Image (spheres, coloured by chain):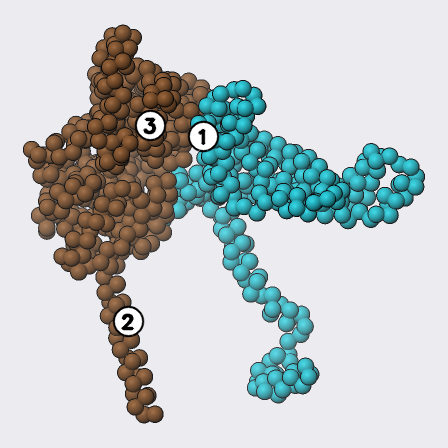
Chain colours: A cyan, B brown
């Protein structure tokens, strides 16, 4: 039936077109099919990247299109690398990335390990744990802002109940020391389920017979965990760390919604600084240079990390 | 068959014709862009008269204050045609004029005999002129606004509180004449129990993201002696921005924030201030005058319970207030400039301006605000007039955005985060602003 249809289509194709199609090789046909995607990628990913690289060497400002664009060489890069505020923003980002990844990995793996025990009602608990991840960051940011409210916030009341400190003294978003932790708590609450899912996939991929062999060898539970579970789940854990690391390096929405970078500049991560320079101060050339530096940093770190991940997988 | 075909063709033509007529009518509609706030609703109401008179329909694009600058500056910078008319913030005027976003209105004003002498002088300088203090007009003053204060008249008039206050501070509890008095009142009310609720001293601007803390801190700094530049040498800021007087002013603002604001008020601007006052949390409330009509009408805190006062004096008796408000401009990328100019002409009319005030907008027309009946027309009218007489505004340079970003950061770092000293903050501000002007080739 299919052959007959193909034959009918082939016969109905006008001869000049049929001749042209017959001349295309398999490789040519493959290129023909993927070219729309490649063109789209070039237009929306590759071209803007090269354009940003070009702009990073200029004094261009998007809000002053009529001004003469001057080539500044590496001046923008020098200024960024010598700017103390930029380094503070990078430190803030590093602090945020480190603590969120550490907490999410620890809690996520523990939850995955517990869920993997397949206790009664584990499916219900798995679904419940996944709920935060399914919410929109805008919603999460806004309702946590209310939860943190010192006068009416539930979070402040719970802490107050547990610690005896008056709720109005628990100013999570206004206090310089607490504000970074307020964001870390929310990000951990929201994204730990994601890490848990990846770890769970890792745990479920460990063949049962390995544990059975370990049982035969009278290996203790602790020994089984250190010698089988952890090493075999490690590539999955590392993958989760990679995903969360890249994601949190460019974290913007939660910080913007919860603290806006404040109090002062204590939670101003690199992406907030970049947005302010690019779309509030309109220093397009300068912010392009900053974006390129961030891109190189993430790309470089991710590359090193992927190599390490491959080594772990090959063991 | 033939007759049904004819009928179908007839119907199709009728539909096509009616669509064309409707499109032609919509083609004449003007879009006015502004912030989403109470005065915008009043303007919608007012503009119905314009449509009645001219047949030109009005559409509105209102954006919340937090995104107002981002949204419309993007629109102007990308030469968008969304807005035919725009009520842009006063600080945009330099950039909008120099980058060709607004239509210059001098010839139009001359032709239509619209004189800028008929408007409150501060609003002409603040909303219309670029360069400042030169007769180059890019907007018609549309919405006068200024930072002032509201207070809980009902709390201030409680005899037991009056007595206690007098004993403690030695003067009668009432609207403060100086910033020191304002702080004393704020301290007096901080964490006090009134009607079974804990209340706080004052709500002030502390917002970090857009312009909040700059508007609030400047509102105090002006009266302490802060100056943007050497009056004799433009852009010379050393010793003016970071003068000893300015340092004291910023120190005061931080002290007021530390002692007397509600818990968690570290990112508070117009909306949060209104919420704090309306919910009965604070005794005093710093905010732009546009919020007053809404507060006056409020069932819980309005009416006889609310009072208004002008920004108090600084230690040397200087008294200034931060200018707000906007002018209305014709966008140079609009295809309907002629109709947009008709709207400006209509809006400048005295009767329209009088109605504008009655609906809750703040007219800048002398004929309205200098009318003998004006001070008694609303409980806040006199305070508004007195405040408008002492205004100062932030830089309106084309680089106003990076200038504002710098002050937001420096002020928030010191006032809210408590990092460094007031001198460090203002020295840093001089450094940042100098860099901006050097980049612009102005220094």
Q: Secondary structure at mark 3?
A: loop
Residue designated by label 2: B19
Badge 1 local density, few (<14 within 10 Å), some, or many (20+)?
Answer: few
Q: Is residue A265 above or below residue B129?
A: above
> How far is disc 3 from disc 2 in space, using C-alphas?
54 Å
Residue at the image position 25 percent from the left and 10 percent from the top: B163
> Position of A17 compared to B47: left or right?
right
Where is residue B385 drawn, in percent x and y? 16, 30
Q: Can I make out residue A47 in this image?
A: yes
Have a look at marks 3 and 1 and say if they share a chain: no
Badge 2 local density, few (<14 within 10 Å), some, or many (20+)?
Answer: few
> How far is disc 1 from disc 2 in space, using C-alphas?
54 Å
Q: Secondary structure at mark 1?
A: loop
Foreground residue among B443 and A36: A36
Task: Tell us which disc is closer to us: 1 or 2.
Answer: 1
Residue designated by label 3: B280
Residue at far right of view: A217
> Position of A284 compared to B223: left or right?
right
Q: Is residue B115 above or below residue A166?
A: below
Q: Is residue B139 above or below residue B6?
A: above
Image quadrant where residue B424 sits: top left
Q: Secondary structure at mark 2?
A: helix
Where is residue A299 drawn, in percent x and y? 62, 44
Chain bearing mark 1: A
Image quadrant where residue B223 sits: top left
Label ID, residue A152: 1
Badge 3 local density, few (<14 within 10 Å), some, or many (20+)?
Answer: some
CB under 8 Å between discs 3 and 1: no
């Amino acid at each position: 039936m299919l052959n007959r249809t193909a034959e009918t289509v082939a016969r109905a194709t006008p001869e000049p077109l049929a001749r042209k199609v017959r001349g295309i090789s398999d490789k040519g046909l493959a290129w023909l099919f993927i070219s729309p995607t490649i063109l789209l990628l070039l237009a929306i990913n590759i071209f803007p990247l090269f354009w940003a690289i070009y702009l990073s060497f200029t004094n261009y400002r998007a809000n002053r299109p009529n001004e003469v664009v001057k080539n500044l060489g590496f001046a923008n890069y020098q200024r960024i690398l010598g700017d103390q505020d930029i380094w503070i923003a990078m430190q803030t980002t590093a602090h945020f990335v480190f603590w969120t990844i550490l907490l999410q990995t620890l809690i996520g793996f523990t939850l995955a390990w517990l869920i993997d025990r397949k206790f009664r009602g584990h499916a219900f608990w798995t679904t419940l744990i996944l709920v935060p991840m399914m919410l929109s960051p805008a919603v999460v940011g806004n309702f946590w802002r209310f939860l943190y409210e010192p006068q009416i916030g539930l979070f402040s009341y719970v802490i107050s109940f547990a610690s005896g400190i008056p709720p109005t003294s628990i100013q999570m978003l206004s206090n310089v020391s607490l504000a970074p932790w307020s964001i870390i708590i929310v990000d951990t609450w929201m994204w730990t389920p994601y890490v848990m899912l990846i770890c769970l996939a890792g745990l479920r991929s460990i063949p049962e017979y390995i544990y059975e062999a370990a049982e035969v060898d009278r290996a203790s539970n602790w020994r089984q965990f250190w010698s089988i579970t952890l090493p075999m789940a490690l590539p999955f854990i590392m993958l989760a760390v990679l995903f969360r690391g890249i994601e949190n390096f460019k974290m913007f929405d939660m910080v913007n919604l919860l603290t806006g970078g404040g109090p002062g500049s204590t939670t101003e991560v690199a992406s907030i600084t970049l947005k302010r320079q690019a779309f509030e101060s309109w220093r397009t050339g300068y912010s392009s240079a900053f974006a390129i530096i961030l891109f190189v940093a993430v790309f470089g770190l991710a590359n090193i990390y992927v190599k390490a991940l491959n080594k772990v997988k090959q063991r | 068959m033939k007759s049904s075909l004819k009928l179908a063709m007839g119907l199709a033509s009728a539909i096509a014709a009616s669509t064309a007529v409707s499109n032609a009518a919509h083609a004449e509609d003007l879009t006015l862009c502004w912030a989403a706030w109470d005065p915008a609703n009043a303007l919608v109401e007012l503009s119905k008269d314009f449509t009645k008179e001219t047949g030109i329909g009005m559409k509105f694009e209102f954006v919340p204050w937090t995104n107002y600058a981002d949204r419309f500056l993007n629109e102007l910078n990308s030469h968008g045609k969304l807005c035919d008319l725009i009520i842009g913030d006063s600080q945009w005027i330099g950039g909008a004029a120099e980058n060709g976003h607004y239509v210059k209105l001098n010839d139009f004003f001359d032709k239509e005999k619209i004189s800028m002498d008929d408007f409150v002088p501060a609003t002409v300088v603040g909303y219309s002129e670029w360069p400042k203090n030169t007769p180059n007009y890019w907007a018609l003053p549309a919405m006068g606004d200024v930072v002032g204060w509201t207070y809980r008249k009902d709390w201030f008039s409680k005899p037991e509180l009056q007595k206690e206050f007098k004993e403690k501070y030695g003067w009668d509890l009432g609207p403060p004449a100086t910033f020191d008095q304002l702080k004393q009142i704020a301290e007096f009310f901080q964490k006090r129990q009134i009607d079974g609720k804990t209340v706080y001293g004052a709500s002030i601007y502390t917002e970090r993201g857009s312009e909040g803390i700059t508007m609030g801190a400047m509102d105090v700094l002006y009266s302490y002696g802060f100056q943007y530049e050497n009056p004799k040498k433009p852009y010379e800021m050393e010793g003016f921005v970071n003068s000893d007087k300015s340092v004291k002013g910023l120190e005061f603002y931080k002290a007021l924030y530390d002692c007397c604001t509600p818990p968690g008020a570290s990112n508070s601007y117009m909306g949060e201030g209104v919420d704090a006052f309306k919910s009965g949390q604070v005794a005093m409330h710093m905010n732009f005058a546009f919020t007053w009509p809404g507060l006056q009408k409020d069932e819980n805190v309005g009416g006889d319970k609310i009072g208004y006062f002008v920004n108090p004096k600084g230690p040397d008796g200087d008294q200034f207030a931060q200018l707000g408000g906007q002018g209305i401009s014709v966008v140079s990328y609009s295809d309907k400039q002629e109709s947009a100019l008709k709207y400006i002409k209509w809006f400048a009319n005295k009767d329209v301006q009088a109605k504008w005030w009655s609906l809750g907008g703040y007219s800048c027309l002398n004929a309205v605000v200098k009318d003998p009946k004006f001070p008694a027309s609303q409980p806040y009218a006199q305070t508004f007039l007195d405040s408008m007489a002492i205004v100062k505004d932030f830089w309106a340079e084309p680089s106003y955005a990076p200038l504002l970003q710098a002050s937001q950061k420096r002020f928030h770092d010191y006032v809210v985060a408590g990092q460094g000293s007031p001198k460090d903050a203002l020295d840093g501000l001089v450094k940042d602003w100098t860099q901006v002007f050097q980049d612009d080739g102005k220094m």
